[in-house]
Amino acid sequence: MFIYCTQAVLMLVLTFQRESHAGRVLGGHEVVPHSRPYVVLLKTIDQNDTPNFCGGFLITEDFVVTAAHCKAKSYEVIPGLHQYNERHILSVKENFVHNYYNENDYTNDIMLLKLSSKAVWNDKVKPIALADQQGNSLPTLCTVCGWGPTSSKETHMSSKLMEASVTLINNEQCVKENVYCSEGDKGPSGDSGGPLVCEDGKAYGVVSASQTTNGSMLYKYTKIKDNIDWINNIIRNN
């Protein structure tokens, strides 16, 4: 999902084709302020110097996870944000897009950002643990959060951090593409790159893409567990 802003007005431009970036807040509600201290708002500048937004989440003092399709010319990371008037901006030193990311079908849609300086932990800014679940069993009671519109009829971003509960499904398409999926009226209440957080409080996925299937919206999440070695190697070597 890409969000274009002009001065104080933030407008969401959504193009739901067969498959697109995910990013609506369908069936969402406001998050208890700063109860998701790992979530960051990611401002990006593309090759045309256009400002856009994605979501992301802190996993260490100086590394953020987001979606690979959020790659840009430059970045600003805003941690500890609940409302837009609360701003503390961190710059990005380097990005690491997954080696096998496919921009056509969003396979391996994950990227790490190394911050230029370390985030300072406090009650508003903290990291989230990553899931390393083995096997094929699906987690339950998951949530997604971010600043996307709160209904399919709206175009403006929410002024506050929102979240929605989602139930993961295990259909043939999702198994084939090796992604987590949810379906229905409630979808990712956040920007692409935000975390899929399940009942144990760990990040299981990265909000990636969405598509309409049989009249219903299907949301896809890149699996953290399948990328945990890649993540650890990037952090260890940088």
Image (cartoon, helix red, strand yellow):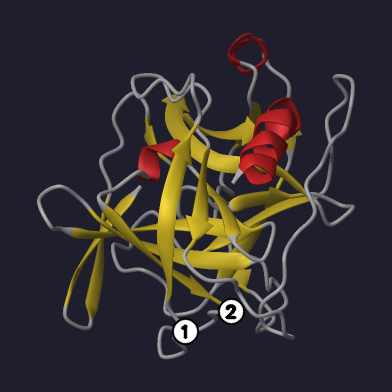
Count residues near mark 2 (Cα–Cα under 10 Å), then give few for <14, some for 14-19, many for 20+: many
Q: Is 79 placed above or below 14 here?
A: below
The residue wearing badge 1 is 88
Q: Disc 2 versus disc 1: distance between alpha carbons?
A: 8 Å
**Residue 11 rendering spot, x and y as whole percentages:** 24, 66
> Earlier along the polypeptide chain: callout 2 or callout 1?
2
Residue 27 visible to an observer of this rendering: no
Which mark is drawn over residue 101?
none
Residue depicted at x 30% and y 68% = 156
Q: Which residue is mark 2?
A: 80
On the image, the x and y values in percent for residue 65 come to 57, 49
Label 1 secondary element: loop
Q: Where 109 falls versus 28 (above or below)?
A: above
Instruction: Sort mark 1 into few (<14), some (14-19) or many (20+) by Cα contacts within 10 Å.
Output: few
Asked if labels 1 and 2 touch by Cβ distance under 8 angstroms, the answer is yes
Residue toward you, 146 or 71: 71
Return the x and y of residue 20 as percentages of the image width and height. 35, 33
Q: Amino acid at mark 1?
A: His
Q: Say which of 127 and 55 sits in front.
A: 127
- Type of residue at label 2? Gly
